[in-house]
Image: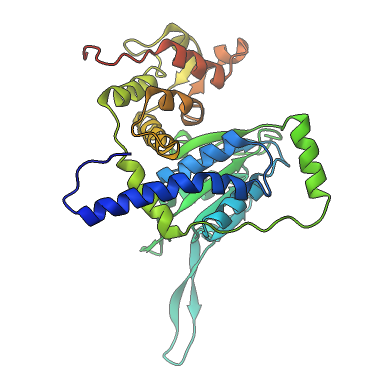
Amino acid sequence: MSFPPSTDSNSKSIEQQTVEQLQQGRSRIITELGKVIIGQQDVVEQILLALFAGGHCLITGAPGLAKTLLVKSIAQVFRLRFQRIQFTPDLMPADITGTEILEGGTEGRRMVFVRGPIFANILLADEINRTPPKTQAALLEAMQEHQVTAAGTRHALEEPFFVLATQNPIEMEGTYPLPEAQLDRFMFNVVISYLPEEDEVKVVAATTAGARQAIEPLFSGEDVLRFHEIVRKVPIAEDVVRYAVRLAAASRPRQQGTPQFVNDWVNWGAGLRAAQFLVLGAKARALLQGRPHVSDADVRELALPVLRHRILLNYRAEADGVSVDQVIARLVESVAFNPGAPRR
């Protein structure tokens, strides 16, 4: 892997060491997670890519698919502080961010800020769509700015900071769908489905036997922050960036060059942040696989997790039985990668 020339030779050697550390550690990460997580290789890879790129994840899946266990295990591998919040209809913003309390002492009374569970490295927001919008919005500033504001005072969050929110696709009665502005803050929407029969047999056998194997920490929070920096330095050709931009733009209905099926089925398409996350995720993917540059294949592989929560279908799509994933698959087929093509 080569990087832009550096005036500091020592800095360059640190970059190369970080790349080697990440690439050599990939198989060890999978091995450690494999002690408690069986199957779900695509899910694990997508969450790791988001972690290395510094993004947040939305996980959609039925109950009992080890979502909480997976997130907690990743926190253990990277030696990150883990907190879990069970979102309920009566949860208040202060229950997440923290609040000020009156504290007495020898010097008199004063207001002291008591930190909430959001002050962690990895925050699992379990069933985020079961809490009202006011409480959901409490996460918005934290996800974007990595800080919370209480009583007019800003409090910086610990770094790295990674939000992983889960949604239950069933029992939607009484839930509060996340608004588009908050959905857009999530880098990926990762879908966890049921395992094949053989994997389910392994899960049942393992979870009904003795104690699980302990997970060995492999990295630290400082390592993760270095990974964030190195991912952004991965070289990428302008043609690949332009392809990511065109792929996101093609999802917007009633625009010049938009495919007809998008005009027919899509009410709202992906914004600029989708293209940014396509590029960042592609860089992380190339880095993990030990390739010296990003390819258009990396962008295509991440189209589903990046776009599926950013495309809003209309009633016609619902009547035609068309899903978001099917629309994205057609988008990938219809938007060609044309290196060296004339610029419009």
On the rendered image, what quadrant is the N terminus found in?
top left
Q: Please state if 332 lies on the left or on the right of 88 as rendered.
A: left
- Left or right of residue 160: residue 255: left
User: Which residue is most to the left?
Assistant: 7
- Residue 159 in view of the camera: no
260 or 221, which is in the foreground?
Answer: 221
Left or right for 285, reference 340:
right
Q: Is residue 59 visible?
A: yes
Q: Residue at x 40, y 32 (%)?
A: 282
Q: Residue at the location (58% across, 44% down)? A: 30
Q: State the residue in front, 36 or 6.
A: 6
Quarter of the image for residue 277 reads top left
Q: Is residue 37 above or below residue 297?
A: below
In x, y percent, where is residue 192?
Answer: 63, 34
Identify the residue at horizontal 49%, vertical 13% (top origin): 330
Which x, y percent locates residue 161?
Answer: 45, 54
Residue 233 appears at what percent x and percent y?
29, 42
Residue nearer the viewer, 248 or 284: 284
Looking at the image, is 278 positioned above or below residue 209? above
The answer to which quarter of the image holds residue 55 is top left
Query: Residue at 34% of width from left, 34% of height from top?
Result: 292
Where is the C terminus found, in terms of image quarters? top left
